[in-house]
Image: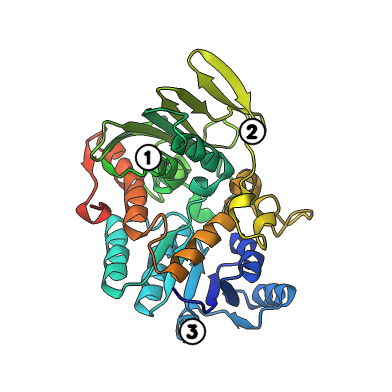
Amino acid sequence: MSSKPINIAIIGLGFGAEFIPIYQKHPLANMYAICQRNKEKADEIGTAFGIEKIYTDYYELLKDPNVDAVHINTPIQNHAEQSIKALKAGKHVACTVPMATSVEDCRQIVELTEKTGLTYMMMETVIYSREFLFVKEMYEKGELGKIQFLRASHQQEMAGWPGYWEGLPPMHYATHCVGPVLALPKGQAEYVSCLGSGRIDEELIPKYGSPFAIETCHIKLRNSDLAAEVTRSLFNTARQYRESFDVYGSKKSFEWTLIEHEDSVIHTGETPSKVTIPDFAHLLPSEIAGFTTAGVYDGDDNQHLSFIQGSGHGGSHPHLVNEFLNALTEERAPYPDARESANITCVGILAHESAMEGGKIKHLPEFTLKG
């Protein structure tokens, strides 16, 4: 176990700036450097947080021998390339979702971690949200009984977001709903079948060649009698923002609230009851516990849209940081590690392929499986 603080570099400072003070206050980290292409913005954030090492060129940052790990928060089309470059440069990687947008890029990341011994963790927010931690605690205490089925959805209107989102296949950004249905039973997807439904605006289709307004995927869990269903939409579907998962057990079932900020529901037999989800800051070091309920931009007009629409991502940010740093310090695999991240991500990639082929079954590749 290492006792040396881990030198962290954050790449991408829109959503990424949310993590700066968490690393600064975490006892295992040294918030060493930031990287942003816009020098004016990088300098502004560096001054605000007292960070001296400021880069505008990611590849120059990777040459810095003092950087132990990078936390990547850039647009999704950059995730795989930047993760691969970091691993080749000898840096540990934490990366926002998804891991990649192709199966081959996921394969390269997994192979690099296994070749180098370096750590990769996909920073999937939902599986460290207070809602997930609440259900996980119920499950581990035996209150749910045997899990019989899992369902999750992520419905979000992306109009007004940066242009690279326009026409994105819904399942290419599915980790927020795939993650929890695999993470709760600590399962792996074996194969998927997905159907597309509806049609987005014609001008949105050409960029990715994806016509569907909604994609719905069934997942068969490996070495299990469990199946799960996930639903994803990005454009032209009237629905309040919702990241959700439902769990149906033999003793109790949990259903995420249908309307944001209302209470979720627990079913015991045929008796439903509303439940207020508690915070789980007590699982964290005291120095960062306050970040489950407050973000960098709280109280002003500059909140990042992902944070606003995601209701602060369920207080997950300090839990993600804590898991990554503890894994590095304890020299163990984080959850999710590279193979688990690839399994979660490839579900979405292969689900879209399945939808384009009318629901054809797609098996997850061997490199995404463990044991």
Considering the numbered disc 1 on the image, is that residue within a helix, a strand or a loop? loop
- Residues 283 and 324: in front is 283
Considering the numbered disc 2 on the image, is that residue within a helix, a strand or a loop? loop
Write down the residue under mark 2.
260
Q: Which mark is residue 60?
A: 3
Name the amino acid, label 3: Glu
Question: Image check: 83 left or right of 6?
Answer: left
Name the amino acid, label 1: Pro
Mark 2 crowd level (few <14, some 14–19, many ≥20, 10 Å Cα): some
Write down the residue under mark 1.
185
Q: Examine the image and state in which quarter residue 241 appears.
A: top right
Residue at (50, 34) in percent of width and height? 138
How far across and down, in percent of the image, does residue 316 sit?
57, 51
Residue at (46, 55) in percent of width and height? 97
Mark 1 crowd level (few <14, some 14–19, many ≥20, 10 Å Cα): some
How far across and down, in percent of the image, does residue 119 sit?
39, 68
Of marks 2 and 3, which one's residue comes earlier in the chain?
A: 3
Of marks 1 and 3, which one's residue comes earlier in the chain?
A: 3
Quick check: 314 above or below 339?
above
How far across and down, in percent of the image, does residue 230 sit?
40, 35
Q: How was the colour assigned to the protein in this rendering?
A: rainbow
